[in-house]
Amino acid sequence: MQTKEAVAKRILQLCDEKKIAVNALATISGVTPSTVYSMLNEKSQNPGVVSIKKLCDGLGISVRQFFDCDLFDDNEQEIQ
């Protein structure tokens, strides 16, 4: 799995755990819904760390907690 796909899955996983919709996450995080949706689909191949940090703030977790997940354990090498 590529890192971008893992990030998208992690966002959806956390929304499910917190029982909030993607639009609600965008609102509480201070980012536009289009930014979050671009992180979830093919539009954004490189989700920015600042955007991820804002989502973490909205979720009430740290960036460390965001990446502390099995999804990131066996990612494909990004440099080909």
Image (spheres, helix red, strand yellow):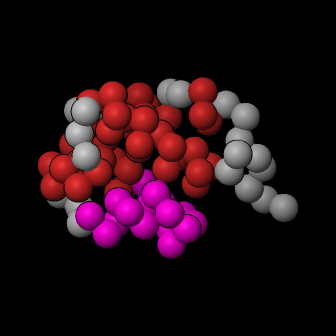
Decide if residue 27 is on the left or right side of residue 66: left
- Counting the numbered discs, the total is 0
* Magenta span: 33-50
Quadrant where the N terminus sits is top right
Vertical order, 26 against 56 (above or below)? below
In this view, 43 is above or below 10: below
Quarter of the rendering containing residue 74: top right
Q: Which one is nearer the viewer's eye here, 66 or 22? A: 22
Whole-percent x, y for residue 76 in the image: 76, 46
Q: Inspect the magenta stretch and tell me whether residue 77 lies in it.
A: no
The percent coordinates of residue 28 (x first, y second) are 15, 49
Q: Residue most toward the bottom?
A: 43
Q: What is the residue that sits farthest to the right in this orientation? A: 80
Residue at 26% across, 64% down: 33
**Residue 48 among those drawn in magenta:** yes
Rendering coords of residue 5 (x, y %): 59, 51
Where is residue 39 shown, x and y percent of the image?
Answer: 45, 60
Q: Residue at x 78, y 49 (%)?
A: 77
Please report the residue visible at 35 percent of the width from the left and 60 percent of the height from the top: 36
Q: Give the quarter of the image for residue 32.
A: bottom left
Q: Quadrant of residue 4?
A: bottom right
Answer whether residue 51 is visible to the viewer in this image.
yes
Question: Residue at horizontal 84%, vertical 61%?
Answer: 80
Residue 54 visible to the viewer: no
